[in-house]
Image: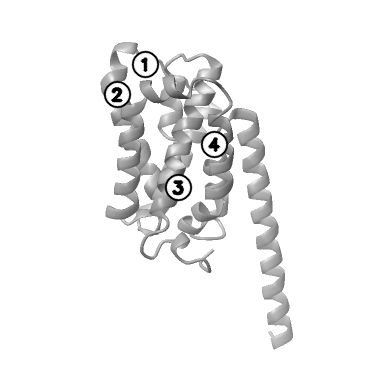
């Protein structure tokens, strides 16, 4: 292949990549608008086809955070939800920092297989319409466990939806409370992930990395 052909091929590849990135972001945004979640899940999953998971998470962090903050303030029950799920939120922060720093974050060898497993489980739950029910008596001890697991997955995959979303859905919350609780959980996860992505060699620590 001559020099001109090589340059042209690289240019075509870059254009296709840009179009794919645009498609991934638009699709993830549409899904988020319809079901109030899924922007990082779909966005990171698709973008990881053309870039490392850490860069995919860095690219999705701003639109995910903005939409989650808007979702958080969509209702009047921010404080009641924060009071009810404070243990989940605290362990979510801790788990994200552990996954993001101690385990190497999205740049570790854990990231690709964990991302694939997380997306597979999330897809199976959605396609088979599998729903869980959590007894109220379990909420006290289960919330911090779910928060820790969700934080670990957030810190290592960039996906904030598992297992916090199925757990919140299992509590039989009113629709408005569920949407706001999801917004609260995702907002905390995204801000913590953004912090983790600014440390060391993480993508957001270098403005030219993404």
Q: In the rendered image, which residue does mark 3 sit on?
A: 158
Question: What is the x, y in percent for residue 191?
Answer: 44, 44
Question: What is the x, y in percent for residue 94?
Answer: 30, 41
Q: Nearer the viewer, residue 6 or 140?
A: 140
Describe residue 85's horizontal placement relative to residue 13 as left or right.
left
Q: Secondary structure at mark 1?
A: loop
Task: Say which residue appears at 58% left-offset and 34% top-offset.
Answer: 70
Task: Say which residue appears at 34% left-offset and 12% top-offset.
Answer: 135
Look at the picture and state if 17 lies above or below 195: below
Give the number of callouts.
Answer: 4
Going from N to C along the chain, the mark reached first, 4 or 1, is: 4
Q: CA distance from mark 3 to mark 4?
A: 15 Å
Q: CA distance from mark 4 to mark 1?
A: 24 Å
Q: Residues within 10 Å of mark 1 (few under 14, many from 20)?
A: some
Going from N to C along the chain, the mark reached first, 3 or 1, is: 1
Q: In the rendered image, which residue does mark 4 sit on?
A: 68
Question: What is the x, y in percent for residue 18?
Answer: 67, 60
Q: Secondary structure at mark 2?
A: helix
Check if mark 2's residue and mark 1's residue have beta carbons within 8 Å.
yes
Q: CA distance from mark 4 to mark 2?
A: 24 Å
Q: Nearer the viewer, residue 135 or 101?
A: 101
Residue 121 is marked as none
- The answer to which quarter of the image holds residue 16 is bottom right
Check if mark 4's residue and mark 2's residue have beta carbons within 8 Å.
no
Q: In the rendered image, which residue does mark 2 sit on?
A: 142
């Amino acid at each position: 292949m001559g020099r001109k052909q090589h340059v042209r091929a690289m240019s075509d590849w870059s254009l296709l990549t840009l179009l794919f990135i645009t498609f991934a972001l638009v699709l993830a945004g549409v899904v988020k608008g319809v079901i109030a979640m899924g922007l990082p899940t779909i966005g990171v999953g698709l973008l990881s086809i053309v870039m490392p998971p850490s860069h995919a998470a860095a690219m999705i962090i701003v639109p995910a955070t903005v939409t989650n903050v808007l979702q958080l303030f969509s209702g009047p029950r921010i404080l009641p939800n924060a009071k009810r799920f404070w243990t989940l939120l605290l362990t979510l922060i801790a788990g994200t920092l552990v996954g993001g720093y101690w385990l190497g974050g999205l740049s570790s060898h854990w990231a690709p297989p964990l991302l694939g497993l997380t997306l597979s489980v999330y897809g199976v739950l959605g396609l088979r319409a599998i729903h869980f029910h959590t007894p109220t008596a379990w909420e006290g001890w289960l919330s911090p466990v779910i928060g820790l697991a969700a934080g670990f997955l957030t810190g290592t995959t960039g996906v904030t939806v598992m297992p916090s979303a199925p757990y919140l859905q299992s509590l039989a919350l009113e629709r408005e409370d569920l949407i706001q609780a999801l917004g609260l959980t995702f907002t905390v996860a995204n801000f913590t992930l953004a912090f983790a992505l600014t440390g060391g060699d993480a993508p957001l620590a270098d403005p030219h990395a993404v």
